[in-house]
Image (tube, helix red, strand yellow):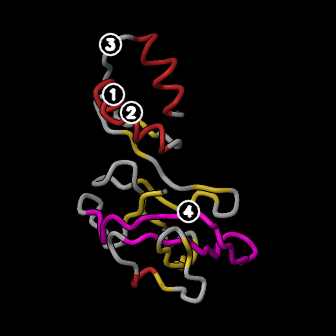
Amino acid sequence: MQASILVSRIMPAIKKTISLKEVFCPDTAVAETYFDEIFKFAGVPPRTSYNSTETMSCSIPSIQYPLSSILDWRRGIFEFIPVKKDIPDETKIIGIDEVEVGKVYEIVYTGLENDLIRYRTHNAFKCIAKSDGILNTDHPVFNFI
């Protein structure tokens, strides 16, 4: 559900806490702003994943890091353009094993379920961890910026 709808319409109408198993909020910026309120209301932290028209559903929500996601290697090939001071370094493209925690990247995506078209997404992602210990995966965890 959109975090904006949850915060503006549902939470005020219910006016009490509820107990959910999960809350998926694709509008990450709003969910991040109201993270504590959503967590208190639902009893669980909001989660999200990255999706787009070009990439389709190419990530899974991180469990250890709410509002972060892990790019799903089964869906496509991911390459990364380092971004420094909001400017992508188009001369350098690195692999997923070369990303560094704390750095920002644009994703270049080649889907395995379409025409093998390589998309430069122009979306920025910050690597926040090298793994998700709860999911027991050593794939990098990203926040959409």
Instruction: Check residue 37 in the rendering and tell me which mark sits there, or answer none.
Output: 1
Residue type for callout 2: Tyr
Mark 2 → mark 1, Cα distance in angstroms = 5 Å
Q: Secondary structure at mark 1?
A: helix
Horizontal and vertical percent position of residue 116? 71, 78
User: Mark 4–mark 3 contact, CB under 8 Å?
Assistant: no
Q: Which badge, 4 or 2, comes first in the chain's sequence? A: 2
Mark 4 → mark 2, Cα distance in angstroms = 25 Å
Horizontal and vertical percent position of residue 109? 61, 73
**Residue highlighted by disc 2:** 34
Residue positioned 64% across, 63% down in the render = 55
User: Mark 2–mark 3 contact, CB under 8 Å?
Assistant: no
Residue positioned 36% across, 55% down in the render = 62
**Residue highlighted by disc 4:** 58
Instruction: Check residue 5 in the rendering and tell me which mark sits there, or answer none.
Output: none
Residue positioned 40% across, 79% down in the render = 99
Residue 112 visible, this angle: no
Mark 4 → mark 3, Cα distance in angstroms = 35 Å
